[in-house]
Image: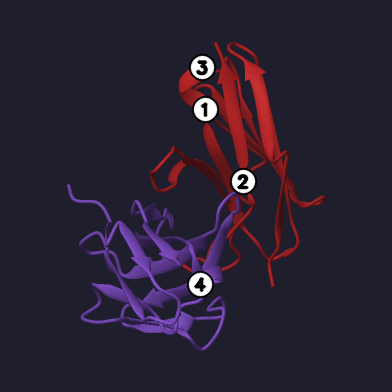
Amino acid sequence: GENVEQHPSTLSVQEGDSAVIKCTYSDSASNYFPWYKQELGKGPQLIIDIRSNVGEKKDQRIAVTLNKTAKHFSLHITETQPEDSAVYFCAARANQGGKLIFGQGTELSVKP
Amino acid sequence: GAGVSQSPSNKVTEKGKDVELRCDPISGHTALYWYRQSLGQGLEFLIYFQGNSAPDKSGLPSDRFSAERTGGSVSTLTIQRTQQEDSAVYLCASSLGSGNTGELFFGEGSRLTVL
């Protein structure tokens, strides 16, 4: 079955710097790669996603890149702000509507 | 509009007791998922419902865990004879189901502590 590895587990940056979180997946049939943000005491919330027919997607300060050959995908946050501090999860799914397999999470801390 | 609602938000129980966790999905969402999040860990898939049927229950850790969904809406996750290793946050999510973006909308979770 699908396995998703995520690095780093913790990341601390200064406000205004960029943050990069990387994931790898094992199932070459995976075609949907979302990123979720989880704030303390809340459920995860979708922030951006990418499908396998696209190499990059941007939404304001957030971008995601996908390398299907290497089975890597990454989240890039530019001009980080303290409110970006949270746990971020990558995920992968092979079948539309089927289960999402999540990475272990990255705890991002943005210091003012 | 109303999001995914889970109850109880917190449950403390003694080892060996049975517990039931409830999930009310967003109205109209046909797909429903249960995940488990242990301290400092990722989201572990448990089971997925499409309507009232469960095409994928491969993540249930043991036969002490079961889940059902009735009327294509509310779902209950039952853990029998709880063990200390069952302590975790149990998250429920719903989505519009196949043929759509597949975005999962999560509830805030039920935190289970087994003493």
- Asked if residue A111 lies left or right of residue A8, the reply is left
Q: Which chain is represented by purple in the image?
A: B
Q: CA distance from mark 1 to mark 3?
A: 8 Å
**Mark 2 packing: few (<14 Cα in 10 Å), some, or many (20+)?**
many
Q: Tell me what hue chain A is rendered in.
A: red
Query: Quadrant of residue B12 in the image?
Result: bottom left
Work out whether residue B64 or residue A83 is closer to the camera in this orientation and state it.
Answer: B64
The residue that mark 3 highlights is A81
Q: CA distance from mark 4 to mark 2?
A: 18 Å
The residue that mark 2 highlights is A105
Work out whether residue B49 or residue B15 is closer to the camera in this orientation and state it.
Answer: B15
The residue that mark 1 highlights is A85
* Residue located 32% across and 78% down the image: B51
Residue placed farthest to the left in the image?
B1
Q: Amino acid at mark 4?
A: Leu
Q: Amino acid at mark 2?
A: Gly
Relative vertical location of residue A86 with respect to residue B70 in this rendering, above or below: above
Work out whether residue B105 or residue A7 is closer to the camera in this orientation and state it.
Answer: A7
The residue that mark 4 highlights is B46
Label 4 secondary element: strand
Residue A27, given in percent of the width and then of the height, sits at 72, 65
